[in-house]
Image (cartoon, rainbow, N blue to C red):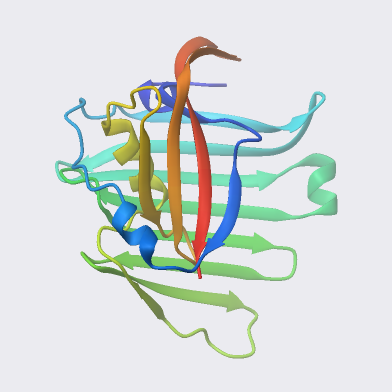
Amino acid sequence: MYRLTALQKLIYLAPGLLSISTIWAAAWQSTITKDPPGNFPTPPPLEAIYNFGWSGFTAATAEARFTRPGSDRFQLEGAGRTVHLARILWKFDVDYRSVANASNLRPIESNQTESYRAKKITTHLVFGSNSVRRSRTETPASTPGKPREFEFPNLFDLHSALLYLRSQPLSNGSVYRIVVYPGTAAYVATFKVARREKISVHAGSFQAIKLDLQLQKIG
């Protein structure tokens, strides 16, 4: 079952165009995009169910729900799990919740719980105007995890990064560079707008914007 809205149709990442490296020099800081959020309409509510696999074999499923629980909040909730033979080989469940400010599209907090066969990892991020504080626990664990803080202005998490990109004009050939802290480390994420094209999924065919994504871990 699929229910798609503009939030899904607008942006998708091109398979094979993703590269990850580590960035050490400080010169990249001057290249970060400073454009404010655009004036596109508020994203409508979204509920979607996804199946992941290959050659007709389903290896995992996921559900996502995007809502606006208050006038000043956007919320994204998701859950995923391996299924069938893939679950026998690799048991994995994940729950995710992220809250963003509806006016400036900045992250407020996010929680993620990853459950494996022999352990569970919980990550909690709290964002300020110039930093993010990460708390991470692992069960069972020999020693409790210590909170860590990463300082950089105008950080994004995954949810708020998608909201911000959606708000931009995304003209063909344009480049956006932001700093994203998705869970345990910070990355410089560079998005280049490749082109407009039509994609076809189970729910139908839709006009989409194809993006090239490059990730550089901040070392």
| Left or right for 8, reference 133 | right
How many numbered marks, from 0 up?
0
Residue at image coords 85%, 52%: 89
Q: Whole-percent x and y of residue 208?
A: 45, 18
| Left or right for 157, reference 3 | left
| Left or right for 32, reference 112 | left
Seen as rendered, the residue at the extreme bottom is 143
| Left or right for 189, reference 91 | left
Residue at image coords 44%, 49%: 189
Residue 128 falls in image quadrant: bottom left
Whether residue 72 is situated above or below residue 201 in the rendered picture:
below
Q: Whole-percent x and y of residue 177?
A: 37, 46
Q: Nearer the viewer, residue 74 or 178?
A: 178
Q: Whole-percent x and y of residue 174?
A: 36, 30
Whether residue 144 is situated above or below residue 116 in the rendered picture:
below
**Rendered-image quadrant of the N terminus:** top right
Whether residue 102 is situated above or below residue 44 in the rendered picture:
below
Q: Whole-percent x and y of residue 30?
A: 29, 57
Residue at image coords 38%, 28%: 7
